[in-house]
Image (tube, rainbow, N blue to C red):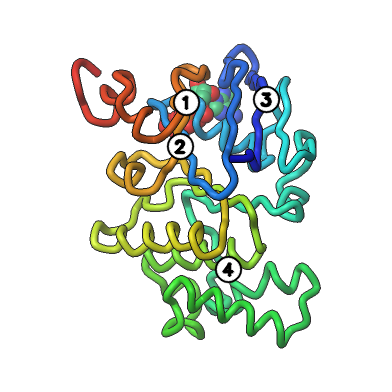
């Protein structure tokens, strides 16, 4: 299957710290890819390199054949790359619907069409009943769903999810995972996730890359990577930590 995104030989240095060392990653079209690793492994740095908020010291990021390495996050958004944040950032004073309309209006969608399209995303994430409530009234799980609706409103082909179940109460997690799976299946969106919960990862990801100290230790199918002893040690508590 063709790759939608390729990270090629990317190194990121912060002063003397090498956060990523010659990392390659291929994200297959229509699949969900997980970035795994212990604390400080470079997961967030790799995520930010793909999102465009960190520019690599060397190496390239190629999206659908275009070199987007030097492009800003907002310009990547036009290419079809969207991201969510670990700490959600809705406009608290705007309603749920208005929050989802923002990216559409920013793309010069006429107001009536923006309202209609935004309502379809609000419905897709299961927040129709909250449509006219101010975003600040939402629970953490509902905010995560609003974040997904806002991401959909950028009409992405690649969606980057940062700890999408972080801070969400356990009973609400399956609904969010179901939504993400539907984004992939029904809308064909390719997904990259950074996530600490192995149970979540196993239920979500097709492919995975495992980093340690900025280097790729293993990459392949999620099932294969989950069997790697380094992954088992960190995520499943096998052996000495
Ligand atoms: N802005 C920065 N300035 C200096 N060093 C940084 C910066 N961002 C990350 N680092 C360092 O780069 C390395 C990789 O960090 P990164 O946050 O990517 O790891 P991570 O795998 O996401 O870790 P965690 O699971 O703890 O979030 C770490 O040594 C970190 O201290």
Of tags 1 and 4, the one toward the viewer is 1
Quarter residue 111 falls in: bottom right
Q: Residue at x 41, y 27 (%)?
A: 37
Q: Residue furthest top?
A: 16
Q: Circle 2: is it few (<14), some (14-19), or many (20+) Cα within 10 Å?
A: many
**In this rendering, is residue 201 above or below 209?**
below
Separation of disc 4 and disc 2 at Cα? Answer: 34 Å
Which secondary structure, mark 4? loop
**The N terminus appears in which quarter of the rendering?**
top right
Q: Residue furthest front?
A: 1
Q: Earlier in the sequence, mark 4 or mark 2?
A: 4
Horizontal side of 130 relative to 14 (left or right) equals: left
Q: Residue at x 56, y 58 (%)?
A: 188
User: Which residue corresponds to mark 1?
Assistant: 219
Residue 125: image location, x then y, percent: 46, 71
Q: Earlier in the sequence, mark 2 or mark 1?
A: 2
Quarter residue 105 falls in: bottom right
User: Which residue corresponds to mark 3?
Assistant: 8
Q: Circle 1: is it few (<14), some (14-19), or many (20+) Cα within 10 Å?
A: many
Report if the beta carbon of the residue with label 2 is closer than 8 angstroms to ligand 1.
no
Horizontal side of 221 relative to 197 (left or right) equals: right
Separation of disc 1 and disc 4 at Cα? Answer: 38 Å
């Amino acid at each position: 299957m063709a790759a939608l995104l390729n990270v090629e030989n990317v190194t990121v240095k912060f002063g003397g710290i090498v956060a990523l060392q010659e990392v390659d990653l291929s994200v297959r079209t229509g699949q969900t890819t997980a970035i795994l690793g212990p604390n400080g492994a470079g997961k967030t740095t790799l995520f930010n390199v793909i999102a465009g908020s960190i520019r690599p010291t060397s190496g390239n990021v190629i999206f659908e054949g275009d070199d987007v390495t030097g492009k800003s996050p907002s310009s990547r958004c036009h290419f079809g790359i969207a991201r969510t944040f670990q700490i959600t950032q809705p406009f608290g004073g705007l309603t749920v619907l208005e929050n989802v309309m923002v990216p559409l209006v920013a793309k010069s969608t006429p107001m009536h069409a923006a309202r209609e399209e935004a309502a379809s995303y609000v419905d897709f994430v299961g927040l129709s009943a909250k449509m006219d409530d101010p975003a600040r009234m939402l629970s953490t799980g509902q905010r995560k769903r609003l974040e997904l609706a806002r991401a959909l409103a950028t009409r992405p082909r690649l969606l980057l999810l940062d700890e999408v179940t972080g801070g969400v109460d356990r009973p609400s997690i399956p609904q969010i995972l179901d939504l993400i799976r539907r984004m992939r299946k029904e809308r064909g969106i390719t997904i990259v996730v950074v996530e600490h919960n192995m149970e979540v990862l196993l239920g979500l990801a097709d492919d995975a890359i495992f980093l340690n100290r900025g280097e790729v230790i293993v990459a392949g199918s999620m099932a294969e990577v989950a069997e790697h002893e380094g992954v088992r040690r960190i995520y499943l508590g096998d052996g000495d930590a």
